[in-house]
Image (cartoon, coloured by chain):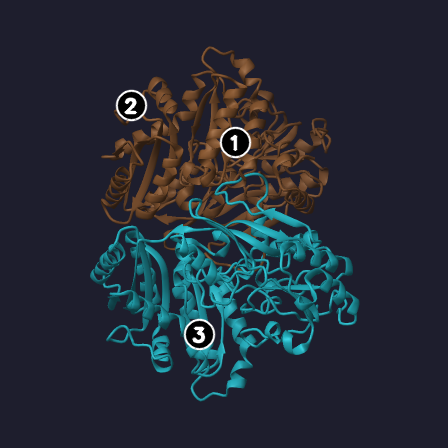
Chain colours: A cyan, B brown
């Protein structure tokens, strides 16, 4: 299972010369120190080992590199901003890392067509800025948006906080330019809203984590900027009541985000991140709700109506609506610091799960009981995009426990939690992908016909297996 | 190019017996009269010739039928409500027609998860009704919704009037159940909003017109029903001003439909369909705009604000906002009768094109000039989903012209119009698909790498070529 499909390329200096002839010598990085940036990923779990980092500057260069790699059966790991959380962007076995960061041009901005065409290496933050500059909005939003690149966002079908209203990354795409394993360039950068001329090829590449082709540019959808936005921070008793609040809110407001936060999350952020508790009383659960409106002042008014009815129905205990942009930002800073503050409470065992919305309360009840049985005193910090059925079901070590021995139980805890998720018809990777991290779990949770079809497609598109080998699928 | 890949099955009575053993004798229809319903399509352009119609009653029966067809190299044409406009559902060469109409169960309705699971043969109207029954909304809406089936809608990635706000049919899908060419069943009916466990397989089948697999059931997204809806009928001078109105409206209202209608369309509908001209003065162009709101009375108020600003900017000549549900329906009846009334004006040569939104005015100017050069006096009836860049660019014969000789120029006119579309980066089939109608045009307009990849995928998923042969792709 772990045997390399291809020979490591470490012994072929001529290959590097040929690569340098394509991208220029300064863009072939082969010394250990200079490679470090590309070989250490955010979780520190999957140390990379590469023959070299290749930094092409254009689609034509990517095409030439892949043609050469195809000819020489050289394995290639595409990489964007190196922010992925499942090791998908890390070379495992002295492959070539193909960094897309130099493909960083904005090729076209078309406010009238509500579209923008950008190259893979443009950061997400820059895409958002370019949209704002023409009074438009690109809704994908992630904590890492300053450094992650749009190519990586699309290759991994990133999620984030605005999925409820705008969909996952794949839903924001009109067209793609992709270099195939043999160097052919699929030119699909149209900005059409409707095009039924044949099979939809773009969705194959999105979410395939660089195993089927290398995305070099994308035509993205833009939206009008909402005239008005507001947020509410709501305290309530149970996740079931959070779901009732969601249904109520979606009826009466344009809800763009709906995030669940447990009491322990407020405690961690007030203790470690200097956050202020937005509500005076303590509540077992909190919801951070964002709404937009096409009327000035409409968002806060809509939220006000929702909260009024929620109080009447006794769904919520307390709530506050953002009175200013600063206050709305403070709510969001609290939400976004939840991952970081966990680090200051010792080891964390993490999950990125989704279940059908109606199964959220059952999932939490069953998983909480199961992990407490496994590790008495474990502190559950379950938070995230509950409006999408997606929770980061993270566990902080018991107070005073030994960090290493706690973390040593990662797989065991995962197995129990994933078992519950699977039984409820859920996903063990809602938004982070498979990468190295969950590759060997995939056969356990995936429909066997779906898995077989994935292998069929991999074989058809990359018969030599040079694209990101050993990621997503076992070799 | 037109040679059959497989032998016609007309000479094998044993095959029908084996099929009858799977689906039951009453569901194998082989006599000519009873087959008629399945072999005549709406445009009367592609007469079908079938060995038999097979009507399975379950996914297991579809699977068994395809296993047998795979074993015997029997070609199969999947068919839903038989409303397609490009001949995709018509057998060309005595194939077996696989009618999915008996797969008509609603498997699950989950208002809390905003989802519904239906089998392929459920009509679109029924999906919409089932959603309404639980206070939800399924936004796909087509003139043929009473008879078209959801399986066909998804296999062809149907468009319709609500794409602007909700996307094409493929965007309304959470998961699919699909029977592959060899009878294996892909079980992907999950209702998750986020699932990044491997390749997205469902989008391959949507829009592939039954050439890669047979969709037997779908998990669909539902939405909260809008608290309020209203429509406006607007008269204006040019398509460019219609686009300016769209940008203005999208900023200040939740625009769900934005349809363009030319003056000649009003004349045809008032003359033939008993419609009342909604405005007192005549205008060269009209827009039918629908908006929703999460506030009671909000839709009409938002539209009012939009129209007020549009008047101030001199974008529009006159407008009326629907004062009642009946009036809104009357606006829509006018819009939806546009295809029918053209029939009463003689022959029509049709196009289903899309261009980037900003190219709409250029397209209309160039195409109008080109078709007038070809056929002086031709009457252009360009209408449709202009908010999506999609127009039904239809041409009624010149007054007093001979219908047959006008229709005889269909291909010649298509070639000219499609040439302009292609030059503007557009699509020659925005929502109707390829089927038989545009199969031989595809190689002229499609990126060669995309077309090659389509063949690669067809070969990988259906190596014997039994699924809807000769549709979409040349054999």
Label 2 CA crowd tier, 10 Å (few <14, some 14–19, many 20+): some
The residue shown at (51%, 59%) is B195
Q: Chain of mark 2?
A: B
Foreground of the two, A445 or B449: B449
Quadrant location, the N terminus of chain A: bottom right
* Residue A405 vertical position relative to residue B228 in the rendered view, above or below: below
Is residue A3 found left or right of A150 in the rendered image? right
The residue shown at (46%, 33%) is B391
Distance from disc 3 to disc 2, alpha carbons, whole Å, reads: 61 Å
| Disc 1 and disc 3 on one polypeptide chain | no
What is the x, y in percent for residue A290?
Answer: 33, 61
Label 1 CA crowd tier, 10 Å (few <14, some 14–19, many 20+): many
What is the x, y in percent for residue B186?
Answer: 59, 50
Label 3 CA crowd tier, 10 Å (few <14, some 14–19, many 20+): some
Is residue B67 found left or right of A192 in the rendered image? right
Quadrant location, the C terminus of chain A: bottom right
Query: Quadrant of residue B23 in the image?
Result: top right
- Image disc number at residue A339: 3
Q: Which residue is mark 2?
A: B276
SS under mark 3? helix
Marks 3/2 in contact by CB < 8 Å: the verdict is no
**Which is more N-terminal, label 1 or label 2?**
1
């Amino acid at each position: 299972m772990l045997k390399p499909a291809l020979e490591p390329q470490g012994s072929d200096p001529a290959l590097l010369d040929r690569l340098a002839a394509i991208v220029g010598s300064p863009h072939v990085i082969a010394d250990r120190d200079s490679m470090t940036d590309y070989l250490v990923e955010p979780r520190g779990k999957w140390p990379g080992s590469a023959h070299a980092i290749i930094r092409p500057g254009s689609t034509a260069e990517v095409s030439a590199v892949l043609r050469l790699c195809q000819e020489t059966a050289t394995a290639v790991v595409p990489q964007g901003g190196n922010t992925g959380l499942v090791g998908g962007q890390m070379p495992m076995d002295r492959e070539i890392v193909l960094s897309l960061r130099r493909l960083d041009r904005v090729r076209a901005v078309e406010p009238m067509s509500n579209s923008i065409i950008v190259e893979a290496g443009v950061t997400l933050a820059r895409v958002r800025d370019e949209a704002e500059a023409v009074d438009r909005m690109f809704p994908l939003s992630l904590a890492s948006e300053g450094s992650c690149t749009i190519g990586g966002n699309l290759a991994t079908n990133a999620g984030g906080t605005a999925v409820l209203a705008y969909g996952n990354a794949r839903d924001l795409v009109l067209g793609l330019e992709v270099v195939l394993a043999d160097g052919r360039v699929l030119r699909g950068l149209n900005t059409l809203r409707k095009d039924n001329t044949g099979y939809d090829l773009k969705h194959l590449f999105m979410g395939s984590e660089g195993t089927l082709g290398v995305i070099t540019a994308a035509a993205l959808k833009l939206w009008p900027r909402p005239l008005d936005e507001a947020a509410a921070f709501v305290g309530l008793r149970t996740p079931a009541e959070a779901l009732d609040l969601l249904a109520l809110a979606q009826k009466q407001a344009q809800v763009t985000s709906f995030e669940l936060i447990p009491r322990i999350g407020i405690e961690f952020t007030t203790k470690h991140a200097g956050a202020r508790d937005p509500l005076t009383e303590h509540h077992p659960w909190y919801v951070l709700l964002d709404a937009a409106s096409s009327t000035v002042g409409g968002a806060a008014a809509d939220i006000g109506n929702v909260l009024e009815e929620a109080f009447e129905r006794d769904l919520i205990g307390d709530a506050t609506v953002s009175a200013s942009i600063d206050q709305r930002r403070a709510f969001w800073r609290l939400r976004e610091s939840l991952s970081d503050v966990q680090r200051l409470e010792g080891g964390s065992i993490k999950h990125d799960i989704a279940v059908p919305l109606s199964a959220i309360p059952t999932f939490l009840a069953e998983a909480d009981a199961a992990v407490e049985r496994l590790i008495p005193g474990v502190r559950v910090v379950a938070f995230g995009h509950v409006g999408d059925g997606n929770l980061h079901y993270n566990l902080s070590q018991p107070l005073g426990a030994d960090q290493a021995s706690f973390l040593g139980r990662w797989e065991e805890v995962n197995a129990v939690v994933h078992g519950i998720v699977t039984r409820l018809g859920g996903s063990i990777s809602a938004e982070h992908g498979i990468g190295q991290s969950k590759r060997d779990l995939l056969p356990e949770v995936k429909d066997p016909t779906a898995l077989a079809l994935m292998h069929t497609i991999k074989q058809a598109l990359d018969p030599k297996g040079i694209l990101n080998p050993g990621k997503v699928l076992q070799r």
